[in-house]
């Protein structure tokens, strides 16, 4: 049901002049879905209050509730089209009345970690792109057909929303910044092994895939009310610079079960590392920071190792943000391991001195759709210098791509071998004492890979070509003789 509804809403959006890509489809679906979710949440709270003998307290004034403007109902449950706004009246209400009202929640909220603040934050960053009130009316009624009250329904919807994010990752040049393959994230979470009571941080959270997967990982067992409250309010923290990614990240976490996600809309790199104190640190960092981007000189001044490469600045930020004994898994370009420029070398030294870089996962080309670069995952713990590094070269046995993405079973061997840092045809260990102290070059060179036959010399190749030409000439002569013999009887008849 949910899948067909999403598809039908996409069909409606396809007709809208202001919506041209999956980015637009996801953005517009998100704000409508959020208001529908909010209405169902308010209905749940109203029922709970009534059962407890208390009056229902609604977040939104009656005029702005979904059940009043988006889907007013008759007694039989059908949409009351006489009361429902449509056409130009609907667009005017949404743009001129509803969005300004919802944006105002940001100022009226008691704090940034409340659902009221998230309402204001979302609607101060997003715009309605429906130009036709008739199309918007159709989309609203399609969304109203969804019920989001059971955990099973929310779980199903969260998977569909993740699928929309994945599609969005292929729309436009910057779409891929929002999506990291979920099998890779799940593997990273398993290695880091978060526990309830620990804080988890992603300073470049995008669609919040790392935080959502970490939540699913921790939510698996039977938890006490206190533990559940800890997961809801004081476990997951994120920051995101881009408005659309920020909105999608909040929506993704809400659908996974976090009612008021601790995600802040800010440029993480604008923070000066010197200002970070112990209270600002986290137990775990899980991240895939954007690489290939550039930051202004004034932003680079916030970091001891200056670089225009955003991923290098983020790595410094993550090291600083970790508590002593904290654990991290961070995706970065594989060239970081071997580049000889000052920033790369200095940052490798900083990482190896301040942290125990215990594992490196070398990902194959095609792991990230459209990225065009190879990546590695760095697993490290803060507080003790690196002595030994375990490498694993992932080889799924096929070319990865849009129609052949990374799967969970592709990472099964990595997860098993990583537990004991075991050697195999794909894994090996490097003693840091054997690494050049000046360059700290950590290039991925698998000593256990099957030996490759050495390349032949040009002379050997030319000799073989000459030999093959001779054999070809002999074959051609034999064929010519056979043809001549077969032609002789016909020649005699003439």
Image: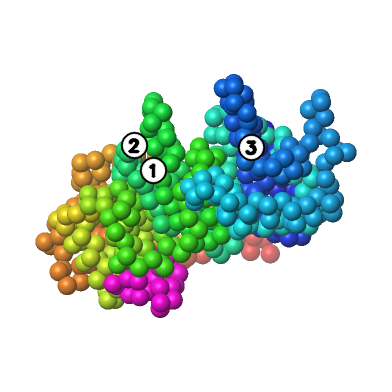
Per the image, is 303 magenta? Answer: yes
Q: Is residue 14 visible?
A: no
Q: State the residue position of label 2.
A: 196
Quarter holding residue 73 = top right
- Neighbour tally class for label 1: few under 14, some 14-19, many 20 plus, Cα within 10 Å: many
In the structure shown, which secondary structural element does the residue marked by tag 2 occupy? loop
Q: Residue at x 78, y 52 (%)?
A: 93
- Neighbour tally class for label 2: few under 14, some 14-19, many 20 plus, Cα within 10 Å: some
Mark 1 and mark 2 residues within 8 Å of each other at the beta carbon: yes
Residue 415 left/right relative to 482: left
Which mark's residue is nearer the viewer, 2 or 3? Answer: 3
Mark sitting earlier along the chain (1/2): 2
Q: Magenta residues, as a range? A: 291-311
Task: Compute the Cα span from label 2 to label 3.
Answer: 31 Å
Q: Is residue 113 visible?
A: yes
Q: Quadrant of the C terminus?
A: bottom right
Q: Main secondary structure of the magenta part?
A: loop
Task: Compute the Cα span from label 1 to label 2.
Answer: 8 Å
x, y percentage for residue 20? 70, 59
Residue 322 left/right relative to 127: left
Mark sitting earlier along the chain (3/1): 3
Q: Quadrant of the N terminus?
A: top right
x, y percentage for residue 163? 56, 45
Q: Residue at x 37, y 63 (%)?
A: 314
Along the viewing direction, whichever of 337 and 198 lies nearer the viewer: 198
Task: Compute the Cα span from label 3 to label 1.
Answer: 27 Å
Which residue appears farthest toward the right when viewing the image? 82
Q: Residue at x 83, y 45 (%)?
A: 85
Q: State the residue position of label 1.
A: 235
- Count how many numbered circles sit on residues in the image: 3
Quarter holding residue 337 = bottom left
- Neighbour tally class for label 3: few under 14, some 14-19, many 20 plus, Cα within 10 Å: some
């Amino acid at each position: 049901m949910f899948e067909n509804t999403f598809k039908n809403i996409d069909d409606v959006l396809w007709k809208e002049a202001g919506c041209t890509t999956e980015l637009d489809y996801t953005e517009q679906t998100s704000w409508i879905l959020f208001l529908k979710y909010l209405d169902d949440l308010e209905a749940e709270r109203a029922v709970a209050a009534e059962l407890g003998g208390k009056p229902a307290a609604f977040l939104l004034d009656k005029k702005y509730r979904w059940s009043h403007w988006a889907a007013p109902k008759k007694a039989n449950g059908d949409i009351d089209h006489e009361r429902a706004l449509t056409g130009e009246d609907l667009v005017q209400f949404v743009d001129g009345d509803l969005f300004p009202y919802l944006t105002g929640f940001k100022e009226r909220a008691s704090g940034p970690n409340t659902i009221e603040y998230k309402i204001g934050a979302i609607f101060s960053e997003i715009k309605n792109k429906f130009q036709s009130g008739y199309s918007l009316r159709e989309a609203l009624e399609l969304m109203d057909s969804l019920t989001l009250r059971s955990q099973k329904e929310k779980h199903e919807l969260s998977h569909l929303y993740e699928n929309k994010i994945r599609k969005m990752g292929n729309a436009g040049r910057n779409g891929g910044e929002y999506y990291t393959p979920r099998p890779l994230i799940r593997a990273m979470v398993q290695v880091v092994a978060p526990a309830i009571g620990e804080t988890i941080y992603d300073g470049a959270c995008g669609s919040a895939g790392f935080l959502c997967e970490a939540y699913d990982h921790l939510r698996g067992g039977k938890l006490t009310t206190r533990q559940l409250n800890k997961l809801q309010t004081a476990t997951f923290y994120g920051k995101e610079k881009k408005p659309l990614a920020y909105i999608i990240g909040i929506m993704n976490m809400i659908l996974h079960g976090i009612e008021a996600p601790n995600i802040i809309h800010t440029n993480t790199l604008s923070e000066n590392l010197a200002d970070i104190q112990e209270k600002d640190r986290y137990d775990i960092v899980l991240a895939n920071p954007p690489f290939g981007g550039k930051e202004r000189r004034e932003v680079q001044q916030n970091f001891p190792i200056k670089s225009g490469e955003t991923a290098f600045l983020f790595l410094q930020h993550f090291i600083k943000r970790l508590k002593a004994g904290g654990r991290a898994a961070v995706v970065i370009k594989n060239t970081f391991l071997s580049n000889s420029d000052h920033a790369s070398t200095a940052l490798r030294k900083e990482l190896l001195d301040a942290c125990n870089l215990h594992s490196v996962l070398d990902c194959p080309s095609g792991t990230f759709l459209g990225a065009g670069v190879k990546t590695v995952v760095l697993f490290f713990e803060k507080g003790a210098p690196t002595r030994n590094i375990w490498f694993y070269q992932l080889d799924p046995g096929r070319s990865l791509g849009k129609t052949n993405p990374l799967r969970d079973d592709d990472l099964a061997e990595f997860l098993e071998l990583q537990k004991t840092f075991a050697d195999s045809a794909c894994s090996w260990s490097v003693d840091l004492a054997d690494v050049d102290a000046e360059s700290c070059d950590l290039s991925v060179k698998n000593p256990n890979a099957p030996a490759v036959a050495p390349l032949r010399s040009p002379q050997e190749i030319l000799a073989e070509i000459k030999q093959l030409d001779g054999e070809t000439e002999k074959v051609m002569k034999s064929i010519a003789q056979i043809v001549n013999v077969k032609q002789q009887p016909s020649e005699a008849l003439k």
